[in-house]
Amino acid sequence: MPQVSAPLIINGHILKNRITMAPTVKFGWAGPDGILSDRHVEHYRERAAHHPGLLCVEATAVAAEGRFCEDHIGLYNDSQIAKHREITDSCHLQEVVCLIQLNHTGNVTNPSIGEPVGPSAVMTRSGMSRELSVPEIHALQEAFIGAALRAQKAGYDGVQLHGCHSYLINQFVCKSTNLRTDEYGGSDANRARFASEIIRGIREVCGPDFLISVRTVGADPDLLSCISVAEEYVRAGCDYLQVSSGIEEPEDAVLKKDEPFNKICALGVRFHDVFRGRVPVSCVNGIVTPDQVRYLLENDLVDTVDLGRAVLADPRFPEAVLYGSEYVRCFSCPRCHYGPFMESRCPAEIKRER
Ligand SMILES: Cc1cc2nc3c(=O)[nH]c(=O)nc-3n(C[C@H](O)[C@H](O)[C@H](O)COP(=O)(O)O)c2cc1C
């Protein structure tokens, strides 16, 4: 029965406990050069100091034209590497394994940033997207691989590919956004190919010890096809699966009667049933109390528990889980105050400062 404080070794990297910090992008913190700000560095230093086993830095663009917005951080050129050293150093000082999430917005790219492109021409919230040619697909794969190499130069233990929440890798997996009939569309293996080839490319340039994780979709459209996609990622060399939601809503059926968590969190639990003993699996979503974290781990439902808003609300949350110490609970606001266009501050953060 894994306890919260039990270490976990993933491809040689020791997580000192089972609590991981999920990627959460910060809007308005960086400049148009995509370079991290001091505010980012301090944010992650403070979170690493309260002992998660692993911390994953927020979605980071692999190409200038695949960003969320003008002030979105990137690792698409070498000038963006140096500042990351400050984050990786503060994590390693605390023996926290440190990953960075790599992303391209694909067909939901804001047209003021870049052309919305994806596996197929489909209507999205950014308008009609353009279908990528095979040479363009290869160029985007190279962008992910180049960003991973820069991440390694910056001292990261590994990368997490952003394979969920409607962005480019997810768009290849999801059947409603991937209508291709070539080797990148159709079967589960073909829809997984875009990311699988990226994983192989990263392994080749970053070496066997570099941790490669995918934050993958649990049910887009259904659980079984997403498990089969994840099997492809594992075959390609993925060391760690972190499961979240996709473009399509997961069916209610993924949640069994009386399970005390939500259906997105349940996706990680279902994946763990399949990958147990082969590849560690994490779950995420709606976990805001130490008891919830302990329940998932002590009942062997997942290998690690990934936390977004609980750790935004209070960086001390991992210690509250480990030692029962004081923390301020996330208010689970309908829209997180760390999100875009939010003028007001996180109420838990305000409460903590009082
Ligand atoms: C402000 C904010 C920013 C986020 N940014 C990212 C991101 O960069 N990458 C990502 O995969 N998910 C992102 N998410 C989703 C979280 O990682 C997490 O999956 C989600 O908040 C649900 O988990 P929670 O209930 O523990 O917060 C973000 C969520 C929030 C609230």
Image (cartoon, grey):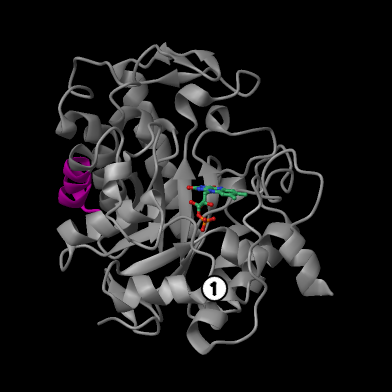
Residue 117: x percent and y percent? 45, 19
- The outermost residue toward the front is 258
Q: 112 or 310, which is in the foreground?
A: 310
Dot 1: element: helix
Residue 18: x percent and y percent? 39, 75
**Number of marks in the image?**
1
Q: Which residues, given as a range, are shown in magenta?
A: 227-238
Residue 5: x percent and y percent? 40, 85
Q: Looking at the image, which residue is at 53% across and 76% down?
A: 318
Q: 148 or 3, which is in the foreground?
A: 3
Q: Looking at the image, which residue is at 84% across and 75% down?
A: 354
Magenta stretch, overall SS = helix
Q: Looking at the image, which residue is at 34% across and 74% down?
A: 297
- Quadrant of the rendered structure where residue 206 is? bottom left
| Residue 346 drawn above or below residue 10 | above
Callout 1 crowding tier (Cα within 10 Å): few <14, some 14–19, many ≥20: many
Asked whether residue 323 is drawn in magenta, I would say: no
Q: Is residue 206 visible?
A: no
- Amino acid type at mark 1: Cys
- Quadrant of the rendered structure where residue 43 is? bottom right
Q: Looking at the image, which residue is at 36% across and 68% down?
A: 304
Asked whether residue 230 is drawn in magenta, I would say: yes
Residue 268: x percent and y percent? 31, 56
Residue underneath mark 1: 91
Residue 135 appears left or right of 111: left
Label 1 beta carbon less than 8 Å to ligand 1: no
- Quadrant of the rendered structure where residue 42 is? bottom right
